[in-house]
Amino acid sequence: MTDENKYRQLLIYAIIYFFLNSFLLPHGMLYTTILTPVMVYYLVKIQKLRMVFIWGILLLIPIPFQVITGVEAKSFLISNIILATCLTFMITSFYLLSDNAHIISRLFRKVLIINTFFVAVAIMILPFEAVRSTMWYDIPITVGLELIPRLKLFTYEASYYSLIMMPVFLYYLLRVFYGIEKHKVLIFLATIIPLLFSLSFGVLGAILIAGITGVVVYWRLIPISLKRTAVYSSITLIALSGILYLVWPENPVYFRLDNIFSGTDTSAMGRLVYSFMFAKDIIIQNNILFGTGPGQIKILAHDMIINHYKYHGVVDEVVRIPNSMAEMLAIYGIYGFTVKLFLEIFFFVKYRIYRNLYSTILFIFIFIYQFTGSFITNVAELGIWIIVFGVRFSEFEFDNKTN
């Protein structure tokens, strides 16, 4: 198959993954799940299907201990099947990206162009409430603040949109800051405007920390253009923050930050504090080492909230833990929590991620974000891990002499 044919096929998958994965499907259903048989066929074709079974052992080890503790069979079985499809997605994506690394940058450019078109359409429909919700997230950002529509395009939520697009946005931001993009201003606007319109504090905060960390750690190795950008951006951001505080102290950004630090922001508290508290308590009552098992949180949650926490208000019909690592702790206990962190660090060293600025910043970003949101079957998070370990952009590589 020629590179052009490979590019066209990958572009179809990329459009589905970045923009349409849940479009017109029932809640919780994804096209990447439906396409699992196609992925299995691909793995058989390249003789890598065995990798699903090899890595699947990690998911099988806790099952006997979880069953002994007690599980609701139907939910347990369905959730394990979903996890198996996620594992298949990760392994398929890894080999697809690794084998076609030379066309990923071209693929990212097309994704950015398509995203820019959709953002333009979203801006045009913003004033029309009847259709606005198709591309904007219409849920208040925090307690006490009026509704501010946030960009989500065809995904289900604004933070999910900004998370899934982060690998593309980061790639082009770095290319702009490295001075290797021809149309710097246009590319910069095409990346920064969607991020700001999504107004996802978790994603923006994590990428800001990751970017600062990467620049500081690799200061001696990064090009002068990036050093200048880092200095000028820092001065500009500090100045704008000060001016904004003096002119408009009650602006939505500062208002939410104040709610977060005061503990009144229910979303932040739920993701950062209550998630781990709930996960800790639920495994203490069930199985500390191997957790409750897939699909069991929603079975146990209502009883625990009412009887353990003595809460007698309205409880959602389906209770979830809005934090990837906290959910991992609840489902797979100390075993799952430890294994996930070990594998992340192991592959960071094995693939020498630290020798590439793009990969390092993206790694730091998703490493932080998994402690602030997401969930264990989130293909946006899983996809970023695959891009970190499976894609290598040579323009951001530190050569041996420099190191």
Image (cartoon, rainbow, N blue to C red):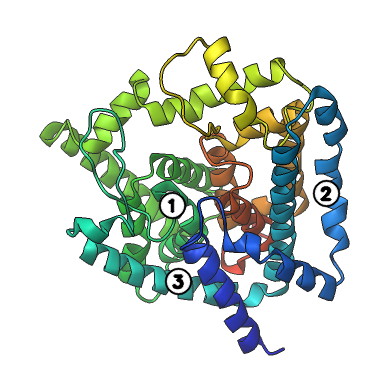
Q: Position of residue 153 (x, y in %)?
A: 37, 60
Q: CA distance from mark 1 to mark 3?
A: 34 Å
Q: Quadrant of the C terminus?
A: bottom right
Give amino acid for label 2.
Answer: Gly
Amino acid type shown at disc 3: Ile
300 relative to 369, above or below: above
In this rendering, the label closer to the viewer, 2 or 1: 1
Amino acid at the residue labelled 1: Tyr
Q: Which label's residue is closer to the chain start, 2 or 1?
A: 2
Depth check, front residue: 39 or 373: 39
Q: Are marks 2 and 1 in contact (CB under 8 Å)?
A: no
Label 1's element?
loop
* Picture residue at 50% right of the left edge, 9% below the top: 310
Residue 125, how many percent across, how many down?
23, 64
Residue visible at 59% across and 24% down?
A: 301
Left or right? Give the position of 47 relative to 162: right
Residue 298 quadrant:
top right
**Quick check: 89 above or below 180?**
above
Q: CA–CA distance between discs 3 and 2?
A: 42 Å
Q: Which residue is mark 1?
A: 156
Verify CB contact (< 8 Å) between mark 1 and mark 3: no
Q: Which residue is under mark 3?
A: 180
* N-terminal-most mark, 1 or 3: 1
| Crowd class of label 1 (few under 14; some 14 to 19; many from 20; radius 10 Å) | some
Name the one closer to the observer, 237 or 145: 145
> Residue 25 vs residue 286: left or right?
left
Tell me where residue 202 appears, x and y as whole percent. 44, 40
Q: Is residue 295 above or below residue 166?
A: above
Determine the CA span between mark 2 and mark 1: 29 Å
User: Crowding near pointer 2: few (<14 within 10 Å), some, many (20+)?
Assistant: some
Q: Specify the quadrant of the image occupied by residue 395.
A: bottom right
For label 2, the residue is 56
